[in-house]
Amino acid sequence: MKSNIIILGIFAVFLVGCSSVEPTAKEYILSPKTEVAQTQQSRFADAVVRVAQPYGPESLFSQNMYYVEDNLQQYYYSASQWAESPKSMITQKILQMLRETKVFGFVLSPASKVATEYLLETRVDNFKQYFQKRDRESYVIVSITFTLSNARKHTVVMSKTFHVKQEVTQLNAEGGVKALNEALKRVLDEAAVWIIEESK
C-alpha cells in the first residue's frame, strides 16, 4: 500500500512537471550585412541629425512574425517570433547605416532630447513574408521611405522610397528571416548611396 502511494506521488509530480513545460518559440534577429560607402564631402558635415522611430503598420510594433497567404489572409508563426519588434531593430540598423556614411557630424537616436536641425523620418510601408500557389512559392517585400527634413524650418530636404522584393528559398520562418535580412541590406545600401549623393 505504501509503495502504491509513493508511485502515485511520483506520477503526480511527473504530470505537473510535464504540464508546466511549454515549448519556447524560436527568436530571430535582423542582422543585414551592409556595405555602406563613406562620403568624402558633405554639406551636412557639421550638422546634427536625429533619427526618428519608424512608423507604419501595426505589425511593426509586435514581436509576432507575420506572413500573408495568396495576398488575402494574414497569419503569424506560432513557434517563431522576433527577439525585438521590427520597429526597434530597423531603427538600430538605420542608425548604424547613417553613422557609417559620415554624412552628418553627429547622428542621434530617437531617445535623444537634444534639439537638432535635421530629422530623418522613416515610414515602413512593407516588411513581410508572402506565400503563393498553396505555399509552394514565397518572397518578402521591404519598402521604406526615408525623409530628411529641416526641423527648424519645417521643410523637406529630400525624400525617397526604396522597394525590394526578395525570393525566399526556404519556405518557413527561418527562410523568411534570411530573405528579410537580404532585402533590408539592399534597401539600406541603396539609401546610403542616395543620402551621400544628395548631401554633396
Image: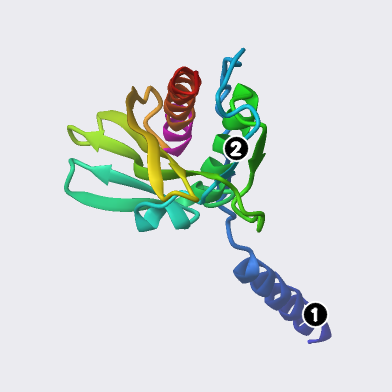
- Observer-nearest of 171 and 112: 112
Q: Residue at x 57, y 18 (%)?
A: 36
Residue type at numbered disc 1: Ile
Q: Residue at x 26, y 36 (%)?
A: 131
- Quadrant location of residue 17? bottom right
> Crowding at label 1, few (<14), some or many (≥20) Cα neighbours within 10 Å?
few
- Secondary structure of the residue carrying numbered label 1: helix
In the displayed structure, 186 sits above or below 10; it is above
Q: Position of residue 39 (x, y in %)?
A: 59, 16
- Quadrant location of residue 156? top left
Q: Are marks 1 and 2 in contact (CB under 8 Å)?
A: no
Which segment is the magenta one? 173-179
Q: Position of residue 181 (x, y in %)?
A: 49, 29
> Crowding at label 2, few (<14), some or many (≥20) Cα neighbours within 10 Å?
some
Residue type at numbered disc 2: Leu
Q: CA distance from mark 1 to mark 2?
A: 61 Å
Q: Position of residue 19 (x, y in %)?
A: 60, 70
Relative to 160, 87 lies left or right: right
Is residue 176 within the magenta segment?
yes
The secondary structure that most of the magenta stretch takes on is helix
Q: Residue at x 27, y 52 (%)?
A: 74
Earlier in the chain: of badge 1 and badge 2, it is: 1
Q: Is residue 80 visible?
A: no
- Observer-nearest of 16 and 34: 34
Is residue 115 within the magenta segment?
no
In the displayed structure, 190 sits above or below 142; it is above
Relative to 98, 68 lies left or right: left
Residue 6: assigned label: 1
Q: Residue at x 50, y 20 (%)?
A: 196
Relative to 183, 23 lies left or right: right
Which residue bears the numbered disc 2?
95
